[in-house]
Image: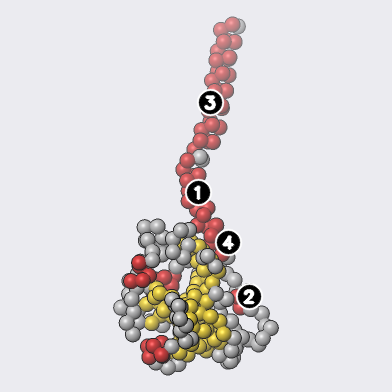
Amino acid sequence: MPSSLAEYNAKRDFRKTAEPAGRRAKAKGSSFVIQKHAASRLHYDFRLELDGVLKSWAIAKGPSLAPGEKRLAVHVEDHPLDYGGFEGTIPQGEYGGGTVMLWDRGTWESEGEPRKDYGKGRLTFRLYGEKLHGTWHLVRMRSRPGEKRENWLLIKSDDECARPEGAPDILDEEPLSVATGRSMDEIAAGALLGPKIWRSNRASDPKPAASKRQPAKRAAGKAKRAASKAKRAG
């Protein structure tokens, strides 16, 4: 099925954001990634590789392991495959400004014909991730007047990887990045503090060192002159 990254590129100024520029990949793969994204509202970006791009859905509540529980998944623009490795901070004021964590990653396997099923609006697939596993469904809802985006539902199948109602939430159990082991706050702090530390090392570190050397040098000079004067007086 034809894919385009024109919308992705049009929404971003790559002179200001570290996000990868949109290029469609030629090689075929089956990767998936979930990125926790603290933008204007916290959500989870669910992405499946198909036809050289990452088909993407924004899930406000994140995935649930409870079988049959329906999580709203808003279909958004295709993303380049390189985006699957992105973790960091998008500058405020830019599209999607906020902190991005690589929450889960792995491969996916369709239980049907992925291109045809995607076109029909009903995908059934298995995930082989570092956090999520088992069979899942993505189902497109009927559009309503005035809706600008396609609304889908992400639903966990009742299989060996599902959890009963009331079981611990995977989002609470596994809050850290699969790439770096960092929390959202640590990722945000790294982006904010890094440049400041770099500037501080260059601008202010030499000054304290110089200020410590100067008094010692002046004191040594005074002592030398005092000893010379005492010698002449004696």
Please report whichever mark, 3 or 2, sits nearer to the chain's N-terminal start: 2
Residue 217, numbered label = 3
Query: What secondary structure is found at the residue carrying circle 3?
Result: helix
Q: Quadrant of the C terminus?
A: top right
Residue with the mark numbered 2? 173
Q: Is residue 36 above or below residue 208?
A: below
Q: Quadrant of the N terminus?
A: bottom left
Disc 1 versus disc 3: distance between alpha carbons? Answer: 32 Å
Colour scheme of this structure image?
Answer: secondary structure
3 and 2 marks in contact (CB < 8 Å): no
Question: Furthest-front residue in view?
Answer: 145
Residue with the mark numbered 1? 196
Please report whichever mark, 1 or 3, sits nearer to the chain's N-terminal start: 1
Residue at x-position 52% and y-position 84%: 154
User: Within 10 angstroms of label 1, few (less than 14), some, or many (20 or more) residues?
Assistant: few
> Is residue 104 something that shows in the picture?
no
Residue with the mark numbered 4? 185
Three-letter amino acid code of the residue under disc 3: Lys
Please report whichever mark, 1 or 2, sits nearer to the chain's N-terminal start: 2
Query: What secondary structure is found at the residue carrying circle 2?
Result: helix
Three-letter amino acid code of the residue under disc 4: Asp
